[in-house]
Image (cartoon, rainbow, N blue to C red):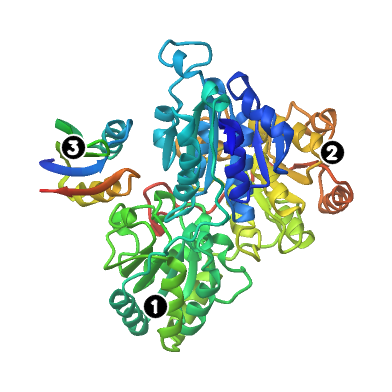
Amino acid sequence: MLLTGSEIVIEILAEKGVDTVFGYPGGNVLSLYDKLAENKKGIKHILTAHEQGASHAADGYARAGNRVGVLVATSGPGATNIITGLATAFADSVPIIAITGSVPIKSVGTDSFQEIDTASLTLAATKHSFFVKDVKKIAETMRQAFHIATSGRPGPVLVDIPSDIQKEKCQFEPIAEKADAYDEQIADIKSLDEAVKMINSSQRPIIYCGGGVVNSGASEFIKIIAEKSGAYAAFTMMGISAMSNTHPKYLGMAGLYGRMEASKAISKADLIIAAGVRFSDRGTGNRERFAENAKVIHIDIDSAEFGKVINADLEITGSLKKALEYIASNIKENNHPQWDKEIENFKKEFEVKETESFTPKRIIETINSLTKEYTPIATDVGQHQMWVSKYYNFKKPRTHLTSGGFGTMGYGMGAAIGAAAATKNRSVLFTGDGSFCMNFNEITTAVRNNIPVTVIVLNNGGLGMIRQLQDCFCDGRRFSTELERKTDFALLAKAMGAKCYSVKNTDELIKAYKDSENGTGPAVIDCYISEKENALPMIPPNGTIDDLMR
Amino acid sequence: MDTFKIYLTANNAGDLILRITAELHKRGFEIMAFNYQVNSENTASIGITASGETNKKEQILRQLNRLYDIKEAIAC
């Protein structure tokens, strides 16, 4: 059939099962929006307040929905506004497709209005980017983009299409199959057998789980391996939703702001089974001394991760799910009473004392008791992000949405919207007063589209994380980190059309959260917390558990 | 720091040079010589002399090998 470039884009989106796209219109995507408006394929468009919000919403949609997130933006500033979102998705291996319009082919290179070389600009923030110069290449390129985004280690892909190419026509052949069937890379059996042998002979094993465990759907095997081998499970921030924190083998997030029992266990282990991790500096601290008493088995779909930070004793490339399934089936039943005893002591050493006051821990645990096991929980970046990683009990994989690798303040609002759109469930965003100010404009998106998001602002009147670092490493000289609570977030939310609450104790919080669930749109709960609350204890950057700051 | 040669075979994509040089730059390598030869409409042979930390040689090959248009990256 004879179709325009824009119609072909929509045909491919439908072919790939996309039901929602996030975006913002502009001069160089007029044709694409015109065809989206015809809605022939039933694809819903969610207009965001800003292109950055669209990029984070596509990211949240992909993470929570386990599918590809799609966003549309125009050329120039539209394209530059999505770069932070692409970089966020790239750092956390999230499959999203960004479709941008560019100036017409004849204007390329003339510095015309809103012209920028988007494909080059996004090179460092995407798995791949395409600039399509021929309408006949659109179908092939779009299909390639989906393949690249979802195969191997997932990631964002950008397709830039000039506005005149969007309007040109060519023959289009639809493909009947909706889903691509990719060959999964299966790990070498010899290496897997070697891993089984190492696990069987270990006396102090730790499974160190990263985002790859969640991405590959391998969470169930972590539990089996831990229970069979007597290993304990520590996590990176991206892997935290792979196991419930009530499981006896759960140690929680390791690293700078994590649970210190997890970091201590890693430092004392004789074997680390690193599954789908990239050994981020926040997780490892001083990499020369990371797990210095242990042998390391590193399993990942991306062989480029091997030896980048930590040199493993055994590197296994391939599908994490298949590899962990094989290991889980072949390891012997084992237990290590001495290791159990030591771990118990580590837990006691770093036990967090309960208080009656309105602390971040209390707020997060209260919300935890009110949400469903499938509720998507988004965070922004800062102290609150660390508190959520430590205190929220994630019961299902893909319920934790956070910018772990790139650390993008302002990520959460868009992500929470995308997650609610993907799962059709109310999502919760934990944010701080600093992060909230970055992208609260997206509340208008949730209001306009009636998207259920409850925002919990842990309001400590400052940029808490940097303020904490200034206190620790700049002799307490605070600069540009005090926000002084001069903005009323509840009133701000009300002005944008959302439900709003200001709360100062647990009872008020429970009442407000329950009331927020009664509505169908967004709600903002501004929680006043003390500025003295810090993300402690912490291991200083490039430090070890021996350098602990309390 | 060490100097070594990297040989690549790849699809002759328009932005390929940019991707290769960006990857080398990102990983802290300096390019001392760069030769790009188009063999046919769809393939290219690329020879690069670069300096960088010896222990990162394997790493950069893995990074280059995972670029979409690269068919093979080897070093000597």
Q: Above or below — where is B25 with respect to A199? A: above
> How far apart in space, not on screen, are marks 1 and 2 (Cα)?
49 Å
Q: Which mark is residue B39?
A: 3
Other residues around mark 2 within 10 Å, as few (<14) / some (14–19) / many (≥20) = many
The residue identified by callout 1 is: A204
Q: Nearer the viewer, residue A259 or B22?
A: B22
Of the numbered discs 1 and 2, the one sitting upstream in the chain is: 1
Q: Above or below — where is A378 with respect to A162? A: below
Q: Can you tell which quarter of the image residue A240 is in? A: bottom right
- Tags 1 and 3 in contact by the CB under 8 Å rule? no
Left or right of A103? Residue A56 is right
Q: Nearer the viewer, residue A81 or A373?
A: A81
Q: Can you tell which quarter of the image residue A488 is in? A: top right
Q: Chain of mark 3?
A: B
What's under tag 1, amino acid-wise? Arg
- Residue A322: give x, y in percent of width and height: 44, 72
Q: Chain of mark 2?
A: A
What's under tag 2, amino acid-wise? Cys
Left or right of A460? Residue A300 is left
The residue identified by callout 2 is: A500
- Tags 2 and 3 in contact by the CB under 8 Å rule? no
What's under tag 3, amino acid-wise? Asn
Q: Nearer the viewer, residue B13 or A318?
A: B13
Q: Secondary structure at mark 2?
A: strand
Q: Can you tell which quarter of the image residue A223 is in? A: bottom right
Viewer-nearest of labels 2 and 3? 3
Q: Secondary structure at mark 1?
A: loop
Other residues around mark 3 within 10 Å, as few (<14) / some (14–19) / many (≥20) = few
